Amino acid sequence: MTQTIAFACDHAGVELKRELMAYLPTLGDYVPLDLGTEGNASVDYPDFGHAAAQALLSGKAALGVVVCGSGVGISIAANRHPGIRAALCANGLMARLSRQHNDANILALGARIVGVEVAKDCLSEFLKTPFEGGRHQKRIEKLDHN
């Protein structure tokens, strides 16, 4: 079954977002949903973090990827939404564990922090790793109810 993956970024993340969207079809039956931005003109990262969160919450996308210069600001914006668990990752292991243990539904990346190949590894690990549940489930419930 085809899964839609939302992609959003600010001006610092445009090139990395494009690389990851082009790489996405090599990972399986995925379709990208591009939520912007498209150019190098300065924009506000919260607008794009919120857009990615809304895409997941509305059912337009199953998972998301957000990118800004450091990945911090856009992940904070996405995490303002109940039910969103955006994980800022700097390597594939972090991405895998964010899914396994934290049921992360948005991968956040810093375009000025990770290179393209590391970002591709993060995306691959994020998409192929399921949530383990079990002992982790009660922790996720605490995140959503505090």
Image (spheres, rainbow, N blue to C red):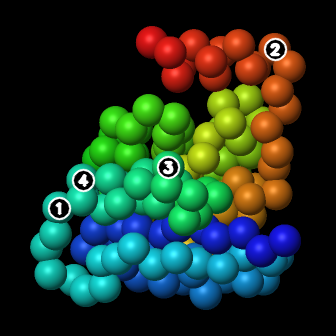
Percent across and percent down for residue 47 are 24, 59
Circle nearer the viewer, 3 or 4: 3
Check disc 4 and give the amino acid type: Pro
Which residue lies under the disc numbered 3?
57
One can see residue 132 in this view = yes
Task: Check disc 3 and report its element: helix, strand or loop.
Answer: helix
Q: CA distance from mark 4 to mark 1?
A: 6 Å
* Among the two numbered marks 2 and 4 on one chain, the one whose residue lies closer to the N terminus: 4
Which residue is pictured at 49% across the width and 55% down the height? 58
Q: Quadrant of the C terminus?
A: top left
**Callout 4–callout 1 Cβ contact below 8 Å:** yes
Check disc 2 and give the amino acid type: Arg
Q: Which of the numbered marks, if any, corresponds to residue 46? A: 4
Percent across and percent down for residue 143 are 53, 20
Task: Check disc 1 and report its element: helix, strand or loop.
Answer: loop
Q: Which of the numbered marks, if any, corresponds to residue 135? A: 2
Percent across and percent down for residue 27 are 79, 75
Q: Which of the numbered marks, if any, corresponds to residue 44? A: 1
The answer to whether residue 38 is left or right of residue 26 is: left
The answer to whether residue 71 is left or right of residue 104 is: left
Q: CA distance from mark 2 to mark 1?
A: 38 Å
Which residue is pictured at 51% across the width and 35% down the height? 83
* Among the two numbered marks 3 and 4 on one chain, the one whose residue lies closer to the N terminus: 4
Task: Check disc 2 and report its element: helix, strand or loop.
Answer: helix
Q: CA distance from mark 3 to mark 4?
A: 16 Å
Q: CA distance from mark 3 to mark 2?
A: 25 Å
Circle nearer the viewer, 1 or 3: 3
